[in-house]
Amino acid sequence: MKIMTVVGARPNYMKAAPIIMAIRKHNKKTAQANAELAGEVAVPVIDHILVHTGQHYDALMSDSFFADLNLPAPDVRLGVGSGSHAAQTAEVIKRFEAVLLRERPDVVIVVGDVNSTLGCALVTSKISFDSAGKRPLLAHVEAGLRSFDRAMPEEINRVLTDHICDLLFVTEESALRNLQNEGIAPETVHFVGNTMIDSLIAFKEKAETSTILERLNLRARTANNGKGGPIARYALLTLHRPSNVDIGDTFLNILAGLEELAADCPIVFPVHPRTQQRIKELGSALQPGMSGTTIHGDGTTMNGNGRDSGNHRGGLILTDPLGYLDFLCLMKHATIVVTDSGGIQEETTFLRIPCVTVRDNTERPATVESGTNIIAGTTKEKVEAAIRRQMASEGSNKMPKKWDGRAATRIIDVLVSAYCGRAASRQSAMCSSLGEGVSPSSRGSSGCAPSVLGT
Ligand code: UD1
């Protein structure tokens, strides 16, 4: 069984990593089970191919995540790079088709909602390997999320991807309702949980080995030979949506809404390349919203020596984009997180850290229902009010269903079953066209051993 997984942009890596881990575990278990069955091969071993489209290509937006998440190097790199939505998606489509025709996988997995997700899904749904129209099963991980805001490019990517996929893997209950309302066949939808949370669970202890708190001078260096001292109160900020950073005065309004918080505690702001560009363009116009700013160097180190100048009583601490473990460490210990990201709303829900989402909507309502997330809007007053509310909040204990670290295992179980079912029906069609009777295997019509698949 050949599975091809596609990643392209930063939020894809942590969603794909647990799937690759689950495939490794499946293969180990299958090797043992098949050995016990003495040569009667019942469950397929999975041959995995990782494709990186290159939508994100900087070391800080890509390579560092492969290292942090123990991801294998991509088997195929499409190198599409940046461009307009049309140009970027078109490059993904053009380059992915050749890979698909060469590798002929049984299953293609796309994750999330970025341009690479839609581009590769579109190619897979229309490819044909033979005259009978044989093509891979197409699976979407993180299906069914809806912001109902078609001005968001990601919303277009989500809707279109879901409607051309064969198997839809869902992270929260709202997605089940959305897919049902859109007339998607229920037997194609599987509520498995959240692979991004699988990664968080797998790496949350390792994140404690990060030195980011020391590098940003957020941990007193008094105990344990200068390490492990008490952690200062700080907030964490991320902003990268075009609607927030590129359009009109929204960026300045959000920063103005953060001034009160910045006077109270430092705000760590790892800056996405799109936002870095905007900050350069705005130049001195930013000053009123950024008093007390500590600006770090433009490379991988801060102020050239990996440490900042210290003495944070408030203001923004700007850094380059951070790796997975550094960012996870910062999230775990933050007093509050302010963001326009989708994934961070989920990660803070799992970590039970108060989150203020500077958007008008969310495609992840489970994060609001859990009590950790507020959808604030983007005006100065609304951002300020939401931050005040979250700073005074008591916290929450509610956790969305199935966010338990087992989503990827469930996905692989479903995919193996679907593959076996497909292989069996193809074999049966071949036999009947040859006039032969089909003798169903004693292991069931799929030919796969249920005891192994069902785990
Ligand atoms: C993309 C996704 C968005 C996701 C975000 C995470 C789409 C439609 N958007 O948005 O859903 O939340 O990734 O970051 O797919 N750039 C670099 N280095 C890189 C990558 C990009 O400098 O490695 C710069 C380029 O100037 C590029 C800009 O950042 O034009 C934006 O990158 P792009 O991939 O187009 O979109 P994101 O805003 O990152």
Image (cartoon, rainbow, N blue to C red):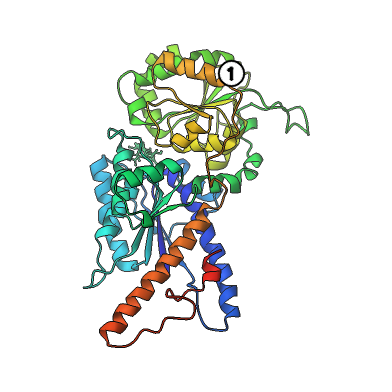
Q: Residue at x 53, y 18 (%)?
A: 389
Indicate the quadrant containing the C terminus: top left, top right, bottom left or bottom right. Answer: bottom right
Q: Residue at x 30, y 81 (%)?
A: 430
Picture coordinates of residue 372 (x, y %)? 54, 30
- Where 89 sits versus 148, above or below? below
Quick check: can you spot residue 12? yes
What's the residue type where badge 1 is placed?
A: Ala
Q: Residue at x 64, y 26 (%)?
A: 218
Q: Which residue is mark 1?
A: 392
Quick check: can you spot residue 56? no
Query: Mark 1 packing: few (<14 Cα in 10 Å), some, or many (20+)?
Result: few
View quadrant of ligand 1: top left
Q: Indicate the quadrant where residue 360 lies.
A: top left
- Where 207 sits versus 109, above or below? above
Q: Indicate the quadrant where residue 243 lies.
A: top left
Seen from the viewer's position, the closer of residues 211 and 334 is 334
Q: Residue at x 59, y 36 (%)?
A: 351
For this view, does 1 lie left or right of residue 437? right
Q: Outermost residue, left direction?
A: 131
Picture coordinates of residue 10 (x, y %)? 43, 43
Cβ at disc 1 under 8 Å from ligand 1: no
For this view, does 355 lie left or right of residue 252? right
Say what secondary structure mark 1 lies in.
loop
For this view, does 45 lie left or right of residue 252? right
Picture coordinates of residue 134 (x, y %)? 28, 69
